[in-house]
Amino acid sequence: MLDVRRLRLLRELAHLGTIAAVAEALSFSPSAVSQQLSVLEKEAGVPLLERTGRRVALTPAGRGLVRHAESVLALLEQADAELAHAKKGLAGPLRIGTYPSAARAIIPALLAELAGWHPGLEPMVTEVDPAAVGAALRAGELDVALVHEYDLVPAEPEPGLAVTRPVFTEPMYLAARAPGTIAEQRGEPWIMSPPGTLCHSMTVRACEAAGFAPRIRHQIDDFTTVLALVAAGQGVALIPHLGATQPPPGVVLTRLPVYRRTHAAFRAGAGSHPAISAFVSALHTAVPPALINGIP
């Protein structure tokens, strides 16, 4: 019989690519991960991994087993959800991930709704970039998270995860000292989020679509600070609506035909869990009406 815990390690190896990354994500030592994967190979009776020096790749049998592992783990999430429905009242921790601008504008009202509906529930909020949410959900570090995607950086389906339909959509703005288009900022220095974030990828692609590669001066992952730097003449930036509600004097926001959409994400099979359902319901209640109906 194949061990579910070892199947989870194989699944993570398929997603993360290296044993070291799996060990870090799941708080194991690399040697422990290697040992457990070797035991899984013996249980399976066929090679699951191809080792070339320090690199490890999945064999066709290994990739096939990962597909089955995704189904097994989703069924276990469904079973956990059914058991949760049999309990009286929601209680215990609910680990929530969110990106920073939603943490300020959405999460406080959401937590207030949850506290009123389910006082026994203990929400625990962590700021995390959407690019890192998948690994955190699969590792069990988060139960549910707010994630976003941009027109220029659409979200790719990720095995093992499920997302809701967009909960709200917000426009993007060019933040500069004067009105203009992205193409007109070709010679300006740019302020953007650090590499590896969706915001960084979105800004780079928006500039490339306008015909140039941005000259990056500052890398800041806080929109309030970004706007302060724009006001100080340090460059220009692209800002979503949630990050641009109170621009400082001297900053001009030019609305762009680019949008950011926010979803709730959770492990596949967990959507019917009462705690996840409560989170999604509270989220819909907490979102300002203007974001649901569309920013004029």
Image: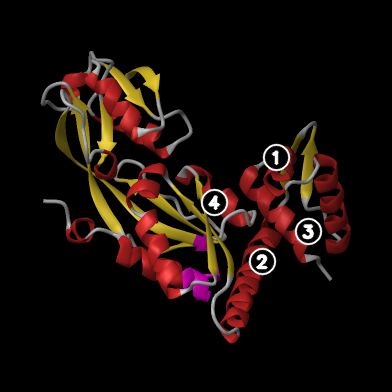
Residue at coordinates 31% horizontally, 52% vertically from top-left?
261
Q: Can you identify the residue that label 4 sits on?
A: 134
Viewer-side label of 2, 1: 1
Circle nearer the N terminus (2, 4): 2
Q: Amino acid at mark 1?
A: Thr
In this image, 16 relative to 99: left or right?
A: right
Q: Position of residue 211 (x, y in %)?
A: 24, 23
Q: Residue at x 22, y 21 (%)?
A: 231
Q: Earlier in the sequence, mark 3 or mark 2?
A: 3
Q: Earlier in the sequence, mark 1 or mark 4?
A: 1
Indicate which disc, 2 or 1, sits on the residue closer to the N terminus.
Answer: 1
Q: Nearer the viewer, mark 2 or mark 4?
A: 4
In the picture, the disc for residue 18 is 1
Disc 1 on helix, strand or loop?
A: loop
Asked if residue 207 can be seen in this view, the reply is no
- Is 173 located above or below residue 269 in the figure? above
> Residue under circle 3?
6
Mark 3 vs 1, N-terminal side: 3
Q: Amino acid at mark 3?
A: Arg
Residue 250 image-quadrant placement: top left
Residue identifier under label 2: 68
Say if the magenta span includes residue 272. yes
Label 1 environment density (alpha carbons within 10 Å; few <14, some 14–19, many ≥20) = some
- The stretch in magenta equals 266-277
Q: Residues within 10 Å of mark 2 (few under 14, many from 20)?
A: some
Tell me the amino acid under the disc marked 4. Answer: Gly
Q: Amino acid at mark 2?
A: His
